[in-house]
Amino acid sequence: MTHQATSSPTAGPPARLESATPQPAKMSSSSQRNSAIPGGRAGRLRRRLTERDLELLNWLRRMRFMTGEHLRRLCFPDGNPVTQARKCRAVLKRLSDHGLIIRLSRRVGGFRCGSDVQVLGLSGLGQAVLDVGNPSKRRHRSVTDTKLAYKEHALAVSDLLVELTDRARAGQCELLRFDAEPTCWRGFAGVGGQRVILKPDAFVRVAIDDWEITSFIEQDMATESLPTITRKCQVYVNYWRSSQEQRDHGVFPRVWWLVPDIGRLKGIARVIQRLPSDAQQLFAVTLTEEAAEQLIQLPAPGGSA
């Protein structure tokens, strides 16, 4: 039996493990794929791409902003890191030459400074290539350059994905699901019946032995006031009290605030302590650099996360 690790007192019965994996789906063979691809520019480009090319493009669509180092660790994990980094750069250059990815302004400073700090995104043509054969009609827009703070936030979420993937490959856990925005958002009826959208930065599900641990992620960059954090916490409390997540998934995930420093950690901890006593256990706060390790910890004896 699989156990659900959660902080909610109304978690409900254990839910079955999902079959989702952290890797984008792959087809059985390139020949089968090419035989079903229609014509047009996007179709012609699609026929020229390898499975690894498509995997890389899918990660960019899911995460919006990533660096070369992110993509190397996700798509080129084996072998000598220097050799694999060179291979990754060659693939990125080819995809860029085809117009499938775009290179945004470089980051300056920070712990990611170095040769692989180029920020990458998916172009409109790249979106169209991934949608070849998809009957649904939607517009394909390129990722656009934006404020540094927004990119920093998105890249921090990508950091977490990569760290958890590394731990899964090392056998420390199984990464069953990692949904970034907007896939991880939840809609529910508010106190007055109005439609409310809960907007976590990510949703994570991992399995360790017979335990399944689910988490909502709030990646804090210390750019919002503590009253704003309080309002965000209240939306989570309202969603928990609606019982919709528990009905849909059998468990309410713990809400993890990931923060850049000790001062911010203490500030958000004070916010949580001011919430109603029954709601405080929904939340946890940790340093961003320790987040991946915290998210794969088994619950303590007694069942709490």
Image: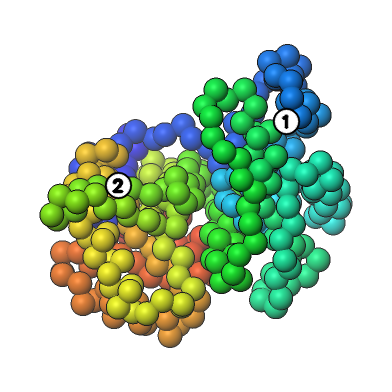
Label of residue 20 in the image: none
Distance of mark 2 from mark 1, alpha carbons?
34 Å
Relative image position of residue 248 (x, y in whole percent): 27, 38
Query: Does residue 234 lie above or below 178 as drawn?
Result: below
The residue positioned 80% from the left and 47% from the top of the image is 96
Please state if 289 lies on the left or on the right of 285 as rendered. Answer: right
The N terminus sits in image quarter: top left
At mark 2, the secondary structure is: strand
Q: From this viewpoint, is residue 46 visible? A: no
Q: Amino acid at mark 1?
A: Ala
For residue 256, what is the image quadrant?
A: bottom left
At mark 1, the secondary structure is: helix
Query: Does residue 113 lie above or below 204 as drawn?
Result: below
Q: Earlier in the sequence, mark 2 or mark 1?
A: 1
What is the basis of the colouring in this image? rainbow
Q: Amino acid at mark 2?
A: Gly
Please state if 158 lies on the left or on the right of 43 as rendered. Answer: left
Depth order, front residue of 17/221: 221
Q: Nearer the viewer, mark 2 or mark 1?
A: 1
Relative image position of residue 174 (x, y in whole percent): 51, 43
Residue located beneath label 1 in the image:
42
Depth order, front residue of 95/76: 95
Residue located beneath label 2 in the image:
187
